Image (cartoon, rainbow, N blue to C red):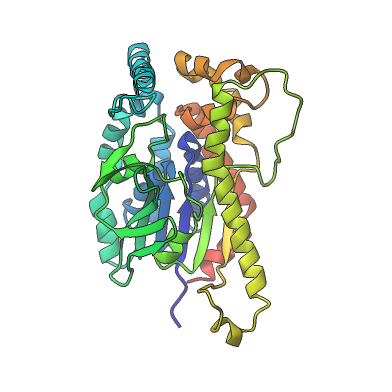
Amino acid sequence: MAKPRIGLVLTGGGARAAYQVGVLKAISHMLPGLAYPFDVITGTSAGAINAILLAGGGAIFNHAVERMDQIWSSIEHEQIYRSDFLGLSSSMTRFLQGALLGESSPQQAAMLNNAPLRELLSEHLRFEQVREAIASGQLHGVGVNACGYTSGRNICFFEAQSDVNNWALEQRTGVRDTLTVDHIMASAAIPTIFPPIRLHREYFGDGATRQMAHLSPALHLGADKLIIVGVSANRTHHPLRKDSEHYPNMGQIMENVLNGMFLDTLEFDIERLSLTNTLLAEVPDVRRLNLPVDVRHVPFIEISPTRPIYDIARKHMGRLPAIIRRIMGHNLQHGEGGVSLASYLLFDREFCRELVRQGYTDAQKKAGQIEEFLIGNR
C-alpha cells in the first residue's frame, strides 16, 4: 500500500505570513533527520510566497527553512512597497483620482506601489528548483491561488506530476501552468491595496478573494493528509463585543473585510472538514463507495496563533510609514480596530521576528502530534 501524501496548506495574511516560517522552523528542529516532509504544497497570497520559497529551497528541508527565516527576519517595508513619503503620497493620489474619475490603470487600481516586491521575489524565488523537485519525485505538486476579476473564479495555478489533472468546480478551478513571479504577485495582490496582475486573458488579485475552499487545491493535487498553518487566533481568542464610542473609520472597516477574506473562510473550511471526518467515521466502508458525492476522510493538523496577532502588532505600530498610520486613524489607540489591518502591512523585521518566534512556540506545543503525524507517514 502506497504511503499517504502529506499536503501543506499556507494561507494568506500579508506580513502575518511570517508566523508560518516559525511553524516550519519548529518542524525542522523536531525532525532534523527528515529529508523532506511534504509531498504537496499550496499557498495563498503571502502564503504563496512561502510555498514557492519552500518548494524551491532544495532537497534539505532545514536549509530551505533557514533561508525563509533569513528573508522574513530582515524584511523592511521598502522591500514590499514604496514607503517613502513621495512614493506613498503619489500612489495614494493616483488611487483617489482614479476612484473619483472612474478611470482604470495599474497605477490607479491600488493604494500602494508594490514594485519593490517584484524585485524581491525575482531575487529569491527559484522556480526551476520547484520543477526539479517535481521531476525528481521529491514533490508531487505545488499550487498557488488567485482570483480572476472578470470571471470571479478562484483559480489554483499548479505544477505537478503527470497524474494530476485540471479540475473545474463551482467558482473553483485548477489549471496546470508554468509558475512565474507574475503568479505570485497576482496571488498576493490584496484588493485595493496592491494592483492586480494580468495572467493569460484576465486580471487576477489576491487568492483569498472568493476562496471558500482553502483546503481543496491540496487535495486535488494528491494530498491525503494535511498540515494547515493559519494566521488567526480566533479559534482560541474570540473577539469581544464592546460598546463603540467612536464611529468606525475606513481602517476599521477595511480590516473586517480583510479578516473575512483571510481568516473567516479558512476557519469555516476547517470546521467543515472536521465535521465531514466525524460523519464519515460513522459510515461503514462498504457504504462509502455508494455515496452520491466523492468524499473521503482526511486527517489533518491545524497550527494557528495562540495569541492574537493584532496584540503582537500593537507595540510595533510606530514602525509603520506615517501616511499609513494616518489612514488607520484613531483606532490604533482604541482597542483592536485598525491594528488588525495594520498587521497585514507591517512588513517590519522586528514584528516579523516576533511572529516567527510565536509560530515556533505554537508548533512546539503540538510537537508530539506533529511528529506522530509525519513520522507515522514514513
> Which residue occupies the extreme right position in the image?
243
- Image height of 279 relative to 187, above or below: below
- Image height of 226 relative to 358, above or below: below
Q: Residue at x 51, y 62 (%)?
A: 226
Q: Residue at x 59, y 62 (%)?
A: 273
User: Would residue 132 appear left or right of 242 to someone viewing this image?
Assistant: left
Residue 356 visible in the current orientation: yes
Q: Residue at x 55, y 24 (%)?
A: 251
Give x and y (percent) for residue 254: 53, 29
Residue 35 visible in the current orientation: no
Q: Nearer the viewer, residue 210 or 24?
A: 210
- Which quarter of the figure is the N terminus placed in? bottom left
Q: Quadrant of residue 164?
A: bottom left
User: Would residue 253 appear left or right of 71 to someone viewing this image?
Assistant: right
> Which residue occupies the extreme bottom position in the image?
286
- Image height of 236 relative to 71, above or below: below
- Image height of 368 relative to 281, above or below: above
Give x and y (percent) for residue 320: 48, 20
Q: Residue at x 27, y 48 (%)?
A: 126
The mark tally for this picture is 0
Q: Nearer the viewer, residue 66 or 294?
A: 294
Give x and y (percent) for residue 199: 26, 45
Give x and y (percent) for residue 358: 58, 40
Q: Nearer the viewer, residue 111 or 30?
A: 111
